[in-house]
Amino acid sequence: MEKDRNKKIEKTKANILEALLLLLQHKEINEISIRELTETAHIHRNTFYIHYTYIYDILAEVEENMCRKVKEMTDGMEPTQLKENLEAVLESVFEYLYQEREKCGLIMRYRGSVSSGKGLVESIFVKYLNAFPNTFNEASVEFQVQFYYCTTGAMGIVRYWMEHDFKESPKRMAALTAKLLTKGIQGALEEAGRG
């Protein structure tokens, strides 16, 4: 019974998202009314309000689900395993983002309205940092700046990839990202050693 109910909710939410994507082909998100969205999705307004309050809530949920999926890719890994397999893990992430490129584009397009999108790589980077000697003072400005630099830089790579129609392979993008993240963390370690 509960399983059937969950499937129905998932189907309704997928229908709402599909309607939103359809409408976004012709207008900006701030031009879309809930009435127009529910008519396109062929649902009652009350059905929309059971799941969401605002249209932007749909985007937040899409991003949250994508972030959870990316985090799950490393859930069973120890930090040292992640460090040793960073490029392979990132390749899985880029493959996933490619498969979900329409949703990824939606998040990146409206990221100022939802979040910075950095949650897509943040969980991996946090675990990756744990593989290094405990030389980081996570409360320090140096650490915070380095963390922000690496996560937003990785999202910049995703944004670049998206804006160039995903032309480069997930494998190539993963290799570039791994290289830059590794250099970033080495810089932070050197900075910590000088401090």
Image (cartoon, rainbow, N blue to C red):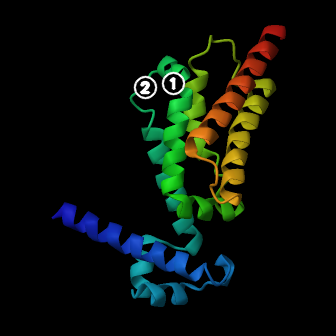
Marks 1/2 in contact by CB < 8 Å: the verdict is yes
The kind of residue tagged 1 is Asn
User: Front-most of 71 and 171?
Assistant: 171
Q: Name which residue lies at 40% across and 76% down.
A: 15
Mark 1 Cα shell of 10 Å, populated few (<14), some (14-19), many (≥20) = some
Query: Image quadrant for the N terminus?
Result: bottom left
In this rendering, does residue 166 appear at all?
A: yes
In this rendering, does residue 110 appear at all?
A: no
Residue 20 picture location, percent across and down: 53, 77
The kind of residue tagged 2 is Met
Nearer the observer: mark 1 or 2; the answer is: 1
Q: Is residue 47 left or right of residue 137?
A: left
Q: What is the C-alpha distance between the residues marked 1 and 2?
A: 10 Å
Indicate which disc residue 145 carries.
none
User: Front-most of 94 and 69?
Assistant: 94
Residue 94 picture location, percent across and down: 55, 45
